[in-house]
Image (cartoon, coloured by chain):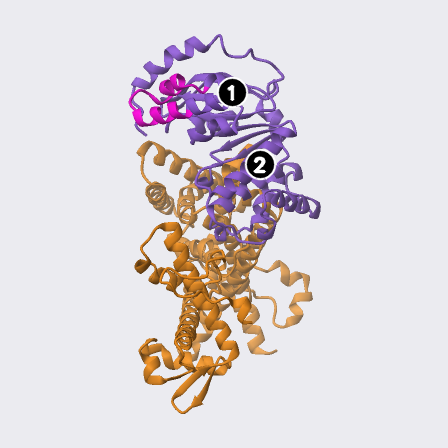
Amino acid sequence: MNPAVHQFLSLDLWPIVAGTLAAVTCGLLGNFLVLRRQSLMGDAISHAVLPGLVIAFLLAGTRSAWPMFVGAALAGVATVVLVEVVRKLGRVEPGAAMGVVFSVLFALGVLLLEQAAARHVDLDADCVLHGQLETLFWFPPSEWGAFWDWLSWSAVPRQVWTLLVMAALASVLVTLLFKELRVAAFDPALATSQGFHAGVLHYVLMVFVAAATVASFEAVGSILVIAMLIVPAAAARLLTDRLGTQIGLSVVVAVLCGTGGYASATALPAAWGGGAVNAAGAMTVVSGALLLGAVMLSPSHGVFAKAVRRRRLSRRVALDDLLAALYRLWEQGQETVTRPTLAAFVPASTVGRAESDALRHALITTSAPDAVALTDEGMRRGAALVRRHRLWETYLVDRTEQRPDHVHDTAERFEHFGVEPPAGPRVDPHGRPIPDVSASD
Amino acid sequence: MNRGPLIVGHTKPATETHLSARPEHSADSPLSVHALTVAYHRRPVLWDIDYDAPANQLIAIVGPNGAGKSTLIKACLGLVPRASGQVEFWGRPYRQARARVGYVPQRESVDWDFPVSALDVVCMGRYRKIGWCRPVSRKHKAFARECLDRVGMADFAKRQISQLSGGQQQRVFLARALAQEAELYFMDEPFAGVDAATERAIIEVLRALRSQGKTVVCVHHDLQTVAEYFDHVLLLNMRVVAAGPVREVFTPAHLHQTYGGKLTLLTEAAEAVGRAAEGERQP
């Protein structure tokens, strides 16, 4: 028997699976919460189900699944209704209404829990917070062969089955009602007027959130639930502009949180000789790191992408400015321009970069040492830029009735972009000719 | 948003004078509103509205801010609860007429950062025909694309909606309404904040709808263009001040009653418009 395999199968496998299933379930449902800008509602519900759970437990006298789910679902719906009531009657913002409702309900749940504990009841407040992922042992198997043994399947921890059913239900909901949930989140009025009642769909979603919360509670605790309702969807939203792709990516992020989080909870501390840390906590921290990664690296909204785009733009503007300056000097008869002359027309900070860019694209040549001249292609580009600049000046003077000496700065910005005012004018407001690009070709 | 109590005093006599001028209720009317009252927080927003929309017309709902124009539309569609009264479409309740009624909400009412493309939004107009739990088929997508083409937006089908200008967003909404293939359309300020080209495109689409025998009810803000764009007008300020063909009803006196004597600038503008409209009607 391989001890590493034995340890993995009996100690690590099902915690990983359970954590990942909980993350995927919450991540799927979280997409629609994030889109409706109701992420906090997940937080609210995951706390507010506690009194529902305790009451259901006290009434049913058992911790079996069904009473728990019914209690949680009712508590979830009650939360949504109460938030709405507090918002309307109290005339406060939705965030405040959610905060009031869930903190009060959670506190009520804790009080009820204390009462139940006094009667030697097996419900633990700690477990609600960070779960008991590490207790999902699997004893029968010793080798991979355990997967072909029916008996060993029956020893799989109950929480895993619960989470598996919940993940399947959430997937079915999101797949079947994809378009209904989408239209209800985007345009509730249209959805309702078409017969897809946005309010009802919202409650269905909330019942699922409440059920997912309960299914996840015992295994992973409420911290991970809250994080997974928000982080995978928010990270995925940064990476795409299509809802279908977003949902797919949110599942990927959730799986990464589940597996990566567990690995970093056990393997990383072990590498430094420490003991394993709480797995659900580690998964949540990993999710935060993934979100940070998405914020930095997103192709369209990311910090990094924006910086690259800005840099690229400023490089192009510097190159444009160089070519336009050389063209204007050429107009005045200077076919080759020495660097000191050029320095009077383009900013010193960018000229070096712009010059090497221009050389690389064969837009200028160094005809003499320390002097540059436009190539044919550079001439064409310079002419097009100066043409656009002067057309804009003409347009701004003609159409917006600005004084000719006020339009240069605006034209200087507009000339770098593809939009060109209608052709026709041959002379700009300062009396300079507007180059005709088609003729110079 | 300043609507004082004086409005009620102003509008009441007008309502009474025009009771006789209003058309009879009929089952042929695409929209009949009977004694409709709507209240928010126990304050009435619409009071005792009676209105029969004529079929195959472009109809404007005109009135000052807070007059209940959007609320009237929403109450008709069951989006806000009615305190009393009833609304019928071709003599039936809305539930039975849903497939024949299209709706274009105000552009600001939705989140334009939502991760969908222009084509996705137009497809939403087909959801009713597709039904519950079924994906959008290729056939419906092709139809949605045609609708985008009809408002001149075919090239923007794949564009994420936040990357569209205000006018383009409004056209996407209009294309979505076309995709609904309704017979009666409610549009909440389709001309608000759009460029001139979009305004022309929208009015062309509205006229095309009318020529196909459809009825369009628009909340409209621009008094200048009421006479040019619409056949029929409903002047509204909590109550119906007047309703009927533009040439009969869109008069300086009625506008004065609708907007209240206080708003002299608006009234003057309306009078100028009224005179212009009178002139236009005599070829």
> On the picture, is A85 further left or further right than A35?
left
Q: Say which chain is purple.
A: B
> On the picture, is B5 further left or further right than A21?
left
The residue where tag 2 is placed is B204
Residue A315 appears in the rendering: yes
The colour applied to the residues of chain A in this rendering is orange
How many numbered dots are placed on residues in this image? 2
Which tag is nearer the camera, tag 2 or tag 1? 1
Examine the image and state in which quarter residue A242 appears.
Answer: bottom right
Q: Secondary structure at mark 2?
A: helix
What residue type is disc 1 on?
Gln
Q: Which mark is residue B282?
A: 1
In magenta, the rendered stretch is B250-273
Give x and y (percent) for residue B262. Answer: 28, 22
Q: Is residue A194 magenta?
A: no
**Pointer 1 chain:** B
CA gap, disc 2 to disc 1? 24 Å
**Pointer 2 chain:** B
Q: Nearer the viewer, residue A228 or A92?
A: A92
